[in-house]
Image (cartoon, rainbow, N blue to C red):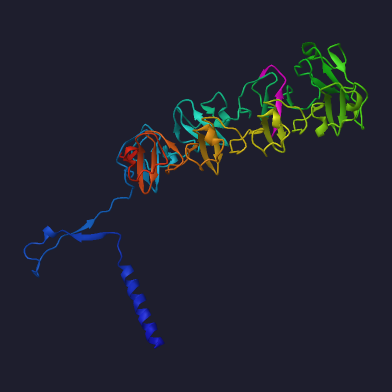
Amino acid sequence: MKNIHKRILSSCLLMILFMLSLSTQDTYTFWANSILGSQTNSNGEVTIGSWTFGPYSPDGISYYDESTSYANGDIIWYDGNIWVNHGYTSLNNIPSTANNWTIYNDLNWYSTVTYRLDDLIYYNDNIYLSKWEQTNNDPITTGVNGPWENQVTDTLSWVTGQATNLNEIVFFDGALWIYKGYYTTSEPGSQNDWALVGNLTYSTNYVYANGDFTLYNGTYYTTTNGGWASGSVPGTNAAWTALTVPTFNGSVPNNTKYTLYNGIFYKALVAINGQKRNIQPGTLASKGIWQAINTQQWQQYNTYVNGDLVMYQTNVYELANVTNSSNIPGTTTNSWNGMATINYNALNVYQLGEYTVYNSNVYQVVNATNANNNAPGTIANAWNQISGYQYYWFNVYSAGDIVYYDDAVYIALTQTTNQQPDLAGSSLAWELYQN
């Protein structure tokens, strides 16, 4: 019995292989009007032709046709995606970034693609807006005077070519820098008039201001006349005052305004007398009494004001609420705003129109109240996802917006939120896109 089954199985396999050997990519048919007379006639001539199948595209959009001349902004379907033409005309150019096409709403930057006024890209953790028509301009190397405008709400990070003025602070290479000259477009740290925030080391290249501190030959100085002090060596004229800075050892002498503790230089915010001499710097009791000066790292018990910048671990933060300045940055809302990054931070306060990146997608605030209480993509009318062309139920769509949904491409007729294009009653908001 087993041998019979084997013979049957072998026969079936041979039959399948034989049929496959006769396979063809064409489907043939005959036309009924080619049969003359009665179809029962045994002698008849039948004309056989090839039935042609066109390439597939969803409803509402045409498949790419190499014989069609496409204009700038035209969209087509090709190889499973919606593509948009970036050229003025495109004839016999298969869609690819090499031929001036991109997938619709692809925010990556391509050196071969022509970008026009107000085109948006996401590149090197920043959002850029094109200021004019241009091709092959790297947003990083072309700098602030180039054709790209940085749209990231973080205005702190230094970019190539950026103009910096006296005492402006920037974030660069993982640290806060302050410019101590009058004007430069140089990279932080590349010239002697740049200083790390909190570094009190004296430099003849710095422009000093009244009340500045510096460290020279092991002695701390302050200046009451920044203009006279600039360019002069501390201790050589009356613009500099040498400071008495004892090391804190359980107390400080009466009325001593400065102390060193654990390598940090502290300035007294109030007169140090009586029992206050015994208050240890850097403790809860020292808040409002001692202020750490020579560091850019967040000090929990420093006295900060809104807008102050600090580093915490490897991130930079800006104080949003002075009442909560002792809260660890990045742990609570309404305290410190994370800066120098476009990545979404649930603890930040966002404004209308600002951008963020969340789960590798780019979003923009369309309702600040909702956005500041909900993560992108979790509630309607808060954040718009602007990367990708799928229909997103949480987006606020405007007239003319194009989406792909349920194997069809639609265009919005009016502003709409959370209304699927193909549902009953949606005809007032959506219709099939036709090109």
When the figure is inspected, residue 95 is found, relative to residue 27, above or below; the finding is above
**Considering depth in this image, is 178 or 44 the residue closer to the camera?**
178
Q: Where is residue 389 in the image (x, y as percent from the top left)?
A: 43, 42
Quarter containing the C terminus: top left
From the viewer's perspective, is residue 228 above or below residue 51? above
The prevailing secondary structure element of the residues shown in magenta is strand
Please tell me which residue is depicted at 53% across the width and 25% down the height of the picture: 146
Residues shaded magenta: 174-183
Residue at 15 percent across and 60 percent down: it is: 47
Residue 173 seen in the current view: no
- Is residue 11 visible in the rendered image? The answer is yes
**Is 420 displayed left or right of 375 in the figure?**
left
The x, y position of residue 351, in whole percent, is 55, 30
Instruction: Answer with left or right where residue 360 lies relative to residue 210.
Output: left
Say if the magenta span includes residue 178.
yes
Numbered label tally: 0
